[in-house]
Amino acid sequence: MNFESGFLSRLKRAKKFVFFTGAGISAESGIPTFRGKEGIWNKFKPEELANFDAFIKNPDMVWEWYQYRRKIVGNAAPNKAHETIVEFEKLYDVTVVTQNVDNLHRRAGSTHVYELHGNIEKNYCVKCRTHFDIPFSEEPKGVPVCDCGGLIRPDVVWFGELLPHDQYQGAEEASEDCDVFFIVGTSALVYPAAYLPDIARRAGSMLVEVNIGATEISDRCDYSFYDKAGTVLPELFEALAAHSLN
Ligand code: BV8
Ligand code: ZN
C-alpha cells in the first residue's frame, strides 16, 4: 500500500494516537462481524438478542448465543492488526478504544484499553450483581442461576443500556486529546461510541480510517485506506519506520 510522504511526516511528528476499533479488526482472527455478509446479526436482529428484554423473555436462547460467541472468541487469537497496535504503543502514547467484547487487544498486549461495550468473558448476576468468571463449557446448557436466585448474564452493554461511565469518559478524554485518531474495522453506526470520531475531529485530530470498504464516516476522514486491517497496519508501521523527516 502507498502512503503519501506528507501523511507519514504528520504521523512521525505526532505523539498521541487513539485506535478506535470495531468488529472488523477481529475478522482476521475468525470472529464474525455484526453486519457483514457473514455477520452474526444476519440470522438475528440486534433487537432480538443483544438487549435485556430479549434476555428476560428467553434467557436460555440469549445465553446460548453468547456461549456460541464465547466459544469462537476462546478459539481466536489476536491477529497482525492487534499486534501492530502493540508495536505502535512502544513508540507513541497509544490509547485503544474498542467496541469489541472479545478481549483480543489485551491478549495481544495493549495496556491502555477502554472497552466501551463490555467483555464477553465476564458475567454478573442481574439481582445481586455478583461477578462470575464462567469458563466456556458445552454443558450444562441454559442460563446459569446465582445462589441468590438471580439469572447470570454476560457483562456486555446491550442496546438501550448505558455504557460503563468510566470507560466512555476515558475514551472521550483520549479522543479530545490526541494527534491522530485511527478508525479501524467499524461501520461507525452504534452510538454513543460513534460520536467519538467527531469529538476527535472537533478537537483538531487527524482522522485515519482503515476498513475493507467505505463507511458512513469515510467522508469525514482525512485519510482512508481500504484494505484489511491486518494488511494496512503492519505496512503503515513499516513505512513509518523507513520514513525520514528531512
Ligand atoms: C445507549 C455489545 C441509551 C453486545 C453492542 C444516539 C445516542 C445514544 C444511543 C443511540 C443513539 N442513536 C441510536 C441509539 C441506540 C443504540 C444505537 O446506537 N443503535 C444503532 C443500531 C442505531 N445505542 C444503544 O442502545 C447504546 N445504549 O445509548 O443507551 C440510553 C440513554 C439513556 C439511558 C439509558 C439508555 C448501546 C450500544 C451498544 C450495543 N452493544 N455490543 C454484543 O456484542 O453482543 S453493539 C455492537 O455493534 C458491537 O459492540 C459492535 O462492535 C458494535 C458496532 O459494530 P461494528 O464493530 O462496527 O461491527 P460491524 O459489523 O457493524 O462493522 C464491521 C466493520 O468492519 C465494517 O465496516 C466492515 O467493512 C469492516 N471490516 C470487516 N473485515 C475487516 C474490516 N475492516 C478492516 N479489516 C477487516 N479485515
Ligand atoms: Zn445473585
Image (spheres, rainbow, N blue to C red):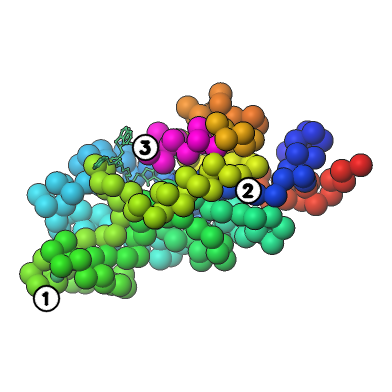
Q: Element type at marker 2?
A: strand
CA–CA distance between discs 1 and 2?
Answer: 45 Å
Q: Please state the horizontal and vertical placement of residue 232, each as a whole percent of the image.
A: 66, 44
Q: Bounds of the magenta span?
A: 188-200
Dominant SS of magenta comes to helix
Residue 147 - label: 1
Residue 33 is left or right of residue 198, and the answer is left
Kindly tell me whether residue 184 is visible in this rendering: no
Residue 44 lies in the magenta-colored region = no
- Which secondary structure, mark 3? loop
Amino acid type, mark 2:
Phe
* Mark 1 or 2: the one toward you: 2
Q: Residue at x 56, y 53 (%)?
A: 95
Front residue of 210/97: it is 97
Q: Is mark 3 within 8 Å of ligand 1?
A: yes
Tell me which numbered mark, 1 or 3, is placed earlier along the sequence.
1
Mark with earlier residue (1, 2): 2
Residue 30 at x, y percent in the picture = 47, 54
Q: Amino acid at mark 1?
A: Asp
Q: Is mark 1 within 8 Å of ligand 2?
A: yes
Residue identified by numbered label 3: 191
| Relative height, residue 93 to residue 129 (above, below) | above
Q: Quadrant of residue 103?
A: bottom left
Q: In the rendered view, does 54 fall on the left or right side of 25? A: left
Q: Secondary structure at mark 1?
A: loop
